[in-house]
Amino acid sequence: MSIPVLKIRTRLSEVRYEIRGELARRARELEAAGRTLVKLNIGNPGAFGFRAPAHLQEAVAGNIAAADPYTHQQGLPAAREAIAAFHRARGTPNACPERVFIGNGVSELIDLSLRALLDPGDEVLLPAPDYPLWSAATILNDGVPVYYDCRPEHGFLPDPAQIEARITPRTRAIVLINPNNPTGASYPRVLLERIAAIAARHGLLLMADEIYDSIVYDGTTFQPLAPLAGEAPCLSLGGLSKVHRACGWRVGWAVLSGDPIACGDFHHAMDLLGALRLCANVPGQFAIGAALHGEATIAPLCAPGGRLHEARRAVIEAVEASEHLSLVPPGAALYAFPRVVGPAARGFDDHRFALELLETEGVLVVPGSSFNVAWRDHFRVTLLPEPDVLRDVFARIDRVLSRHAAA
Ligand code: PLP
């Protein structure tokens, strides 16, 4: 008897997550065959020698005996109070523990919050390029991604007029990824004020993915959205993964702000969906208070002489020295998003290039079009390796591009 083949969800065919896709699979094959690779596809601090700060590790280890029970679906009260206090200090209006939701990373909260918001056919305004989970979660919650452009010609900044022009009666939310993955852009205050005013005018939820919030370089500042949104409903997302180098602990949070009446039943919906999955990973929640108390420990790494600062500098200098690349220098976050220019860009295909780079030079990058843009001339690297590794990587990239230019 032949067993019938399982059918999976049809809409999955529309979903992509190439950061861990075909190229990553090919990389594993090459490694299994003995190749040594430089893998720059994931912003995974722990894979590049970064450790969570010792006082966070102690907070988890010291409380492990208290971490057996489920917590409240929104998270441990003390952790939620720490998040609320952190948000009050940065000016989020009326931040209180009752409006904080702790999740298994920001990833889970992106999915949960879109599930709380969307009916089939509802639209979500997303940046292009985006962090592809946002598109995937929109689609898998039966929504429709509608993109606004963040082009290199404009420093990867969005145009509020275009955002407003793309609003329809089905639009439910405007998503901002700030600081941005993959572009490294950090949005100025006036721009955020204009977008917040648009959301308020049209009754849309602002969703601010601020997971890279204090990873800023060379005088760039980070402006949180919620303080500018005032009474407009705003969900601010942050977590331990990047700023606190603990992505394996799976700890993220969402803070709801804005007029409770305007927020309608959104709070209740998040609470219900949170309850259905019981609670987030408990041991990691014990680190939240330690993480948010005092100065962010990421700051010295981003300052001159710090590892991330020097890695970023190495990439900027390598691009400047290359005749085949251009770059909007990333002001923030953990990535550079260079563009291939000149003769090497003729007939360039980012996927073919990424595969060739992997096979011939042993370097794994993410093709730019993986971030839901039609352009095929960008690629993303993470800034997490040692500066010397990045210098060597860009020499290898230049070798491949020189062959393209000569072809
Ligand atoms: N949002 C952005 C913009 C990201 O880059 C990432 C991870 O790379 C996430 C969310 C997911 O973070 P978490 O580890 O908290 O699930």
Image: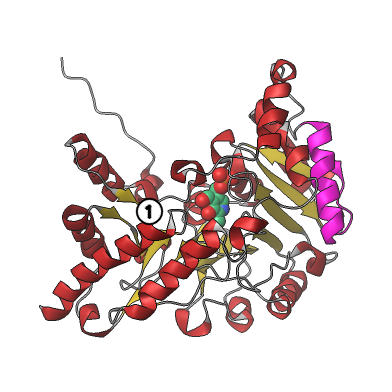
- Residue 346 vertical position relative to residue 73 in the rendered view, above or below: below
Quick one: quadrant of the C terminus? bottom left
What colour scheme governs how the chains and residues are painted in the rendered image of this protein?
Answer: secondary structure
Q: Quadrant of residue 277?
A: top right
In-image side of 250 versus 78 (left or right): left
Question: Which residue appears at 31% of the width and 78% of the height?
Answer: 322
Q: How busy is the neighbourhood of tag 1: few (under 14 within 10 Å), some, or many (20 plus)?
A: many
Question: Which residue appears at 66% of the width and 74% of the height?
Answer: 219
Give amino acid for label 1.
Leu
Q: Closer to the camera, 86 or 144?
A: 86
Q: Quadrant of residue 214?
A: bottom right
Q: Which residues are magenta?
A: 76-97
- Residue 402 vertical position relative to residue 312 in the rendered view, above or below: below
Percent coordinates x, y for residue 191 in the rendering: 68, 78
Question: Which residue appears at 47% of the width and 62% of the height?
Answer: 311
Q: Closer to the camera, 283 or 266?
A: 283
Asked whether 261 falls inside the magenta stretch, the response is: no
